[in-house]
Image (spheres, rainbow, N blue to C red):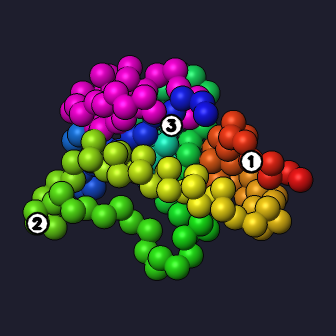
Amino acid sequence: MSDFVIIDLEVNPQEKKVLDFGAIKSNGVKLHTSQKKEFENFIEGFEYICGHNICHHDANYFDVSTNVRYIDTLYISPLLFPERPYHNLLKNDKIQSDDLSNPLNDAIKTKELFYDEINALQQLDKTYLQILVNLLYDKPEFNGFFNYIQFMDIDYYN
């Protein structure tokens, strides 16, 4: 598999300002910081950046100079786990609902979900997988994921 980094941000919704950044690389190296530049340096150079709602939220709050593909676990999850009615990350580490989330903990949870999605994908009927790829490959919410799985030993075109 290709290297990737999984990220999460804590954003003040009123001010549209990032309060905290969290990230974990595929090799397990972690970052938790409030400094945007430190975060951007940490994720720089990765072809794949993964997050839970990265396409329509997190990606709006940081810059990277390379061409990246976003893997968005929020959109893949309902396809692979249709029996789950909701696809939010569980926030077991929050004591009260108005407490700030810990973006590093959420990045770690997203990494676990990403691996669960990969495992579920490997169990799919190949015809169903081919239909999903054909219908969704060109959509930004799915393109990164389907592009990434080309590095795996899954023959989803045949």
Q: Residue at x 30, y 38 (%)?
A: 22
- 100 displayed left or right of 137: left
Measured in 3D between alpha carbons, the distance from the residue under mark 3 to the one under mark 1, in whole angstroms, is 21 Å
Q: Is residue 28 magenta?
A: yes
Instruction: Please name the residue that numbered disc 2 is placed on.
Output: 96
Q: Can residue 57 be seen by looking at this rendering?
A: no
Measured in 3D between alpha carbons, the distance from the residue under mark 3 to the one under mark 2, in whole angstroms, is 29 Å
Instruction: Please name the residue that numbered disc 1 is placed on.
Output: 154
* Quarter assignment of residue 99: bottom left
* Quarter assignment of residue 27: top left
Residue 112 lies, with reference to residue 151, above or below; the image says: below
**Badge nearest the viewer, 1 or 2:** 1
Q: Residue at x 60, y 30 (%)?
A: 2
Which numbered tag is attached to residue 49?
3
- 22 displayed left or right of 95: right
- 36 displayed left or right of 58: left
Q: Which residues are magenta?
A: 21-48
